[in-house]
Amino acid sequence: MSLLLPLDERDGVIWVNGRLTAWRDAKVHVLSHSLHYGNAVFEGERCYGGKVFKLREHTQRLLDSAKLVAMQIPYSLEEVMAATDLVVKENNLDLGYIRTIAYRGAEAIGVSAKGTKVHLAVAAFEWPAYYGGPSIALQTSRWKRPSPESAPTAAKCAGLYVICTMARDEAVAAGYDDAFMLDYRGQVSEATGANLFFVMPDGALHTPAADCFLNGITRLSVIDLARAQGLTVIERAIWPEEVRQAREVFVTGTAVEVTAVGKIDAQEYAVGPVTKALQAAYAKLVRA
Ligand code: PMP
């Protein structure tokens, strides 16, 4: 299947509300509630050798995200996991990306979601390199991650990505690969679809405490791998002024895996030994 085709013009099957549906027929109505109000919740997963990495964790996060936005997904954890495995198998994917989304239908159009049905779809497709190149450049964004008092920041909720899309596209327009996002307090938070790590002069791995952004499943895996390699991992509030002293910087995420950051604004960073060791350990883990 050509990776250049738009996502709605490909062949294969998509699991929609319990049924395998022909790829091109997996459509939503324009009056769907989630399209207007951004209240869909979703997951991004990868499979390696046809096996979905951390499938249970991703599926649990989908159910948790739904709960945070008061959405009841009408399928159990086991049912969603089985649907995901089925979609990977039916589309003959070895290395693939899975996008699962729960969204509200077109039964009502007012702001209240009362009366809407919750739909679930699982799609899987090839999506090789998120950035391309050995390291990426980040630009500090004018957009800030909101407070958990203003938004369901622990949920992978569609509406929150309005900020990420604007931030990333502005950074890309300025010649960077992604945005370096601060939060509502001015502290370092994340990139637009990946968590941040810094090897600081003390030799420890520092990462922002995930108190107003997604606590990535890759982030948690990399923290475990780093500790297994004998590194000290410190989760704390990090201020942008500190970042200049970092020896190495990298981002983690399902799509980006472990990617080195070579530049933040004008400051350059080497792709160092800690990043390389964690890249190797993560590549081994996902194929285990
Ligand atoms: N932050 C944001 C905003 C994301 O979209 C993602 C990707 N899901 C991450 C962090 C990393 O999360 P994970 O490692 O679970 O993919």
Image: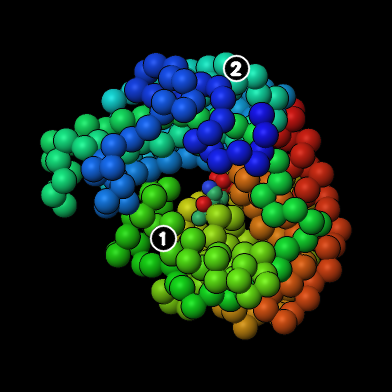
Real-space Cα distance between discs 1 and 2? 32 Å
Picture disc at residue 89: 2
Instruction: Tell me what residue is drawn at x 37 percent, y 32 percent.
Output: 27
Q: Give the image location of residue 189, x and y in percent.
A: 53, 66
Q: Classify mark 2 as within 8 Å of ligand 1 or not, answering yes or no.
A: no
Instruction: Tell me what residue is drawn at x 43 percent, y 64 percent.
Output: 163
The amino acid marked with disc number 1 is Val
Q: Quadrant of the C terminus?
A: top right
Determine which residue is flagged by label 1: 162
The answer to the question of whether label 1 and label 2 lie on touching residues, with beta carbons closer than 8 A, is: no
Q: Secondary structure at mark 2?
A: helix
In the depicted structure, whether residue 16 falls above or below residue 249: above
Seen from the viewer's position, the closer of residues 120 and 60 is 120
Q: Give the image location of residue 33, x and y in percent.
A: 24, 44
Instruction: Tell me what residue is drawn at x 83 percent, y 53 percent.
Output: 276
The amino acid marked with disc number 2 is Lys
Residue 235 visible:
no
The image quarter containing residue 107 is: top left
Q: Count residues near mark 1 (Cα–Cα under 10 Å), then give few for <14, some for 14-19, many for 20+.
A: few
Instruction: Tell me what residue is drawn at x 48 percent, y 53 percent.
Output: 214
